[in-house]
Amino acid sequence: MVDINLQSDNEIPIADNDTENEPESIVIAYLRNKDTLRENDEIFTTRKKSSLLENVPKMETILEELSENSLDVHIPSYPGSPRSLNVGSGTSYTSDIHQDSRIKEAIEFLHQDKEFLVAAEIGNDNLLAIYIRRGFAIQQVDHLGRNALHLAVCSGNLRAIKLLLDSGVDPNVKDNVGMTPLSLSLMRRPSLLVASFLFDHGARIMQRSNPMDTGLFIQFAMMCTPTLEEQNILRLLVYKGAVINDPYAPGGRQALHFAAMSNNITLIKILVKLGADMYMTNHRNETPKDTAATFKCKEAYELLLQLEDKELTISNSSTTFNW
């Protein structure tokens, strides 16, 4: 089974054909020519692409070349992706292609031009500027539902990101797994500057899409070290309206519960300073301190105990003063 991502730089080893006369499948032919096709700084014309794709089977020859002996193919599989097809050599492509429009759509995708999205993924702001001036559709998405901003935030090119935002690319589009450019940025390449750019151009922290969705703040807190950059991002998220104490979080587990169970002292301190409630309970009726004890996280337990004692002392002092 081969997992093919036409916008990925991952190299897939291709074995030599056992038989010289055996025709290559369309997938193998594409992969052999991929490096030639993807020149970062050059715009390919239709004529140039045609010359480079001479070895790639055309649509009219596919029916004859794909059979039970062809390469098993699995187009990239995000949940709900229209390119996620469970088609292998056990079923004849020759007989099914006329009856299954998904197969035809997947094959046609291999010949589809997505120059604008490719330029965004490699962070080539010069090409993006040219394509925008030429009137390319800037809101287009790929087969995973990602728009140019989704791809650009992973490249880390701030000029490309700012160019797309200034051009009006929507920062709140969700891909097929529900990720916006903001959430993808924080999961893949956390940057305070990129997050600020996105918020300044209308990005929003989306509400949880279903009862099992932990939400952006908890997701980001779970993967934090946190570095100084990540600490500042946490503060920014709270400032922009992230819910730090979410009574509807799955299982009642808050960011502070996850920090406690991972013995993350720095994160616990940051979350408490940001207003995390030390007494909220999860589905087991455990506070973050109880969770630390359950997972035998001694440092986290002792810190939360100290913080609870400190809060209690301050509360008692305030009560005495008011009396």
Image (cartoon, rainbow, N blue to C red):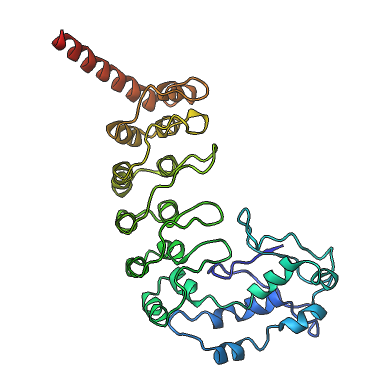
Query: Residue 149: image x %, image y %?
Result: 42, 64
Instruction: Identify the residue at image location x=32%, y=69%.
Output: 159
* Quadrant in the rendering for residue 309: top left
Labels in figure, total: 0
Left or right for 268, reference 49 = left
Instruction: Identify the residue at image location x=81%, y=66%.
Output: 89
Query: Residue 140: image x %, image y %?
Result: 50, 69
Left or right for 315, reference 87 = left
Query: Residue 24: image x %, image y %?
Result: 74, 79
Instruction: Identify the residue at image location x=49%, y=19%.
Output: 285
Indicate the quadrant containing the C terminus: top left, top right, bottom left or bottom right: top left
Q: From this view, report whether residue 122 is shown above or below residue 267.
A: below
Q: From this view, report whether residue 12 is shown above or below residue 180.
A: below
Indicate the quadrant containing the N terminus: top left, top right, bottom left or bottom right: bottom right
Q: From this view, report whether residue 212 is shown above or below residue 120.
A: above
Q: From this view, report whether residue 129 is shown above or below residue 264.
A: below
Q: Nearer the viewer, residue 69 or 323?
A: 323
Query: Residue 226: image x %, image y %?
Result: 35, 43
Left or right for 17, reference 34 = right
Q: Is residue 162 visible?
A: yes
